[in-house]
Image (cartoon, rainbow, N blue to C red):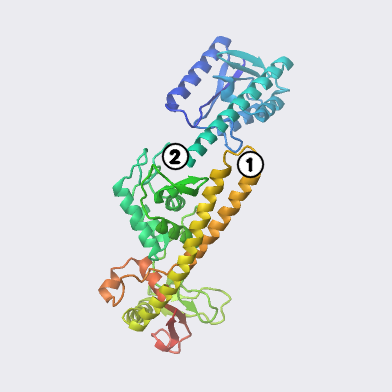
Amino acid sequence: MVRAAIYCRISPTKENKEEKLERQEADSRAVCDRNGWLVEGVFIDPSRSAWMRNRKRPGWDQMLEGVRDGEFDAIVIYHGDRLIRQPWDLELLLSLASEKGIRLASPTGARNLDNADDRFILRIEAAQACKASDDTSRRVKRAKSSLREQGIATLGRTRAFGRELDGSIIEAEAELIRDVFERIIAGEPVASLWHEWSFDGVPAVKAAQWRYGSFRQMLQRPDLAGLVAYQGKPVGEATNLRAIVGREQWDAVQTILGNTAAKYDRQPRPRKHLLSGIAVCSGCDQTVNANATVSGVMRYRCIWPACPRPTSRNMTLLDEYVIGNVLRRLADDRVWERIAANRAAAADDGGRARADLEALRARREQVAEEFADDDEMDPALLRKMLARLDERIGQAQARLGGNRASSVLDGLQNLDRPGWDGLALGRRRSVVRELVTVKLFPSAKGPSFDVKSVEVLDA
């Protein structure tokens, strides 16, 4: 009895995937029935390309493992291009099948992988399939390039949060995006906002709950600012999309995201206490953590093992002391005069940085448009020119972000205690960072709160 493996695959761009995969399997089973073969395994790769070199095909890999282990005598597929669209895949299959007499069958015919003539024909078919895929890829890339030159942004097959499939704005979701952008610029940590969305029920498009990585990726989408993107980077303004947030807002948030340590697709734990990770131990200059004593009293404590003089303070008492210092500064006109002076200087530097950024963007668009259809231009040289301009644009964005005055204190002048308590914890922590530094020293009073052992200075 010949033991057969059925392989089914469908490209990512195809619709009605389940129906077409079922048809492939049914036709392949009919081939097995006609030949009297026993179906020993069915391997499926939905939405997988056989042409892209970096695309994983779990079903294909699992089937090859079965071939290696001698589990199959034949492979049945709907059509040859479902199995192989790159010559190296064929060579891998031939090398595995050379000593096992594997047969290859489909509704349109059969090949014996152990037969030299059949191997020759298969190599020709694989080369033709590869060329067809290359031609298609080239046409698709040229079409997308033409759309970018016209300022037409292309959207994915699945709608993005904040937009319908046709690019129109979903206002309820857009308002949530605008709120997040404003709060990030105001100093709230990205992780805290992700946690709020994830656990307060803001629905994600492709999942039941927002992951930290997908939340960050959503904030980095150029279409939010009405921009056309190439390889994830903005290359011009879109003519077919309305912006959800302003360009300056978008640039500011990209700078903040680029400066944060948590750049990877992991889920950080948002801070739950006002001064954890902010107040510093005088013995080692490391930030303190929050934990509870044996009796259940919450405290801030240095946990660095090498610290020669670890400090510990009652959380409630230290929080109240620092909050009092912060509120006094928010009511001090001299503090606001200093803030105004810093903002004026930042605005002046930021204006020059913004002008440089706009000039670089205009230069990039000019280079792309001037040489895109120049047959004499070396493509590698053009890519190098654009990459260099992208690097300079990134540097200008970082400079603009560095010169941007923090807006974390906006609207907080003469803030009272009820107003403070009404702020989100992430905003409160950002205000503390903006206004003061907190250092803890050993106390002679033991567990009692000692004002002299806490240093609160202007940041």
Quadrant in which residue 50 is drawn: top right
Question: In this orientation, which residue lies closer to the viewer: 81 or 196?
Answer: 81
Question: In this orientation, which residue lies closer to the viewer: 97 or 413?
Answer: 413
Earlier-in-chain disc, 2 versus 1: 2
**Tag 2: amino acid:** Thr
Report if residue 293 is visible in the image: no
Picture coordinates of residue 149, whole percent (x, y): 49, 41
When the figure is inspected, residue 446 is found, relative to residue 214, above or below; the finding is below
Tell me which residue sits at (62%, 27%) in the image. 130
49 sits to left or right of 326: right
User: Which secondary structure, mark 2?
Assistant: loop
Picture coordinates of residue 255, whole percent (x, y): 48, 60
Tell me which residue sits at (34%, 42%) in the image. 168
When the figure is inspected, residue 329 is found, relative to residue 172, above or below; the finding is below
325 sits to left or right of 284: left
When the figure is inspected, residue 51 is found, relative to residue 39, above or below; the finding is below
Q: CA distance from mark 2 to mark 1?
A: 23 Å
User: Which secondary structure, mark 1?
Assistant: helix
Name the residue that disc number 1 marks.
379
Q: Nearer the viewer, mark 2 or mark 1?
A: 1
Q: Are marks 2 and 1 in contact (CB under 8 Å)?
A: no
Quarter of the C terminus within the rendering = bottom left
Quadrant in which residue 158 is drawn: top left
Picture coordinates of residue 181, whole percent (x, y): 38, 58
Question: In this orientation, which residue lies closer to the viewer: 92 or 100?
Answer: 92
Quadrant in which residue 319 is drawn: bottom left
Name the residue that disc number 2 marks.
154
Quarter of the N terminus within the rendering = top right
179 sits to left or right of 370: left
State the residue lying farthest toward the top: 34
Circle 2 residues within 10 Å: few <14, some 14–19, many ≥20: some
Tell me which residue sits at (47%, 31%) in the image. 13
